[in-house]
Amino acid sequence: MPQYYDDLETRSPEQREADLFARLGEQIEHARRTAPHFAETLAGVDGRQIGDRTALAGLPLLRKSDLIEKQRSAPVFGGLTGIAPPELRQIFASPGPIFEPGSDRPDAWRFARALFAAGVRRGDILHNCFSYHFTPAGMMVESAARALGCAVVPAGVGQTELQVQVMAHVRPQGYVGTPSFLKLIVDKATELGSDLSSLKKALVSGEYLPPSLREAMAERGIAVRQCYATADLGLIAYESEALEGMIVDEGIILEIVRPGTGEPVPEGEVGEVVVTRLDPDYPLIRFATGDLSAILPGASPCGRTNIRIKGWMGRADQTTKVRGMFVHPSQVDAILKRHSELGRGRLVVTRENDLDAMCLQVELAGEPPAGLAEAVVGSIREVTKLRGEVAFVAPGSLPNDGKVIDDQRQIE
């Protein structure tokens, strides 16, 4: 039985980078020809010249938070794709609403790789508890199952007792859905005295997987793996049997950037997940997800050689309002760039005597030069139009959690 989904998973890192960036050049040219948004934002860009990550980092970000307005002004997909019927087979509406295209391209969301890593094999029956209603999650699994040669029970969500009845009769080997709904089903089966012993593997996503739940399922003979995916991008990363971080999918280029900017952070530092999807149907280039994560050093012990991330670590959009004015992570970055002596920074927002207060904590090696504190305070005022203080701290002392703005005010 094969250990890996395909040979792409064990390429050398150098070969993978060469392959990905060759595809990226083609993707950029395709996006410019077919998608009005990219024709505008990438005007003058020669995809053949974007040959490495440094060049990629020079392209503009496309923020998920901007999609609602883009799609409102240019229905249906905001000018981000040229796909139309008959190639366009579905139009999904995720919360927002944000609309995503669906096609009949085999394994259109590249979800089969995550299923395979979770132990799913040809001939298995999958009980699919992701929603088939408006959002693409259910079809992500459906498309991948076809690629693997599996049958699917399109169960969706809700009706826990009926879920148990169907599973006890059909005897699926695999479950796909959220971890919390898996627990509800298993608990209901115990309550009803139903036999779900056929269930041996589960791929979960969409919410936090508590270690205690993974362990509880393992005690019942169910091996649970998780993956990280979005409606826009499809699969981003997935767990293998090694259970050491999440391995990045072979069909994307993933970057971790400093929140509020498009600048990549050093390996291990928490930042915003930015993904370029190498898919002609929906050619998202430098798509800023708004999610936080970090790259893990080294390769997975399972033998897959792609980079790994820690998984979902929170949200990157830390915009807050201080004294009636919005303060953005990009403004913090602008302040730091005015002063080359400064390292990493974090704007701490508190409330003192019923008044909002800001203090920019910045890493600085050694004693601050004369006049630096006053200059930084002046920059805070000029960039944010608000008063703030500065506090110098030792290099490496700020938490590595991706926070650029730390709003510590208590909401009553």
Image (cartoon, rainbow, N blue to C red):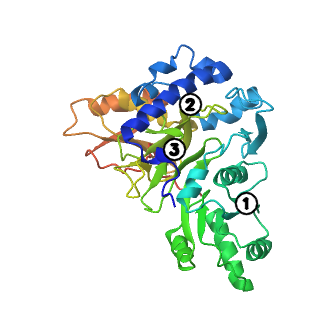
230 lies left or right of 100: left
Q: Amino acid at mark 2?
A: Ile
Q: Position of residue 208 (x, y in %)?
A: 56, 61
The residue furthest front is 1
Q: Crowding near pointer 2: few (<14 within 10 Å), some, many (20+)? A: many
* Closer-to-camera residue (85/205): 85
The quarter of the picture where residue 105 lies is top right
Question: Which residue is under mark 1?
Answer: 152
Disc assigned to residue 316: 3
Of badges 3 and 1, the one in the foreground is 1
Q: Residue at x 62, y 31 (%)?
A: 283
Answer few, some or many: residues within 10 Å of disc 3's Cα (few below 14, many 20 plus, some between 14 and 19).
Answer: many
Q: Is residue 398 visible?
A: yes
Mark-to-mark CA distance, 3 and 1: 35 Å
For label 3, the SS is loop
**Residue 363 image position (x, y, % from top left):** 29, 41
Task: Work out whether mark 3 precedes mark 2 in sequence or the reverse, and give the earlier one.
Answer: 2
Q: Which residue is mark 2?
A: 285
Residue 101's place in the image compared with 379, above or below, is below
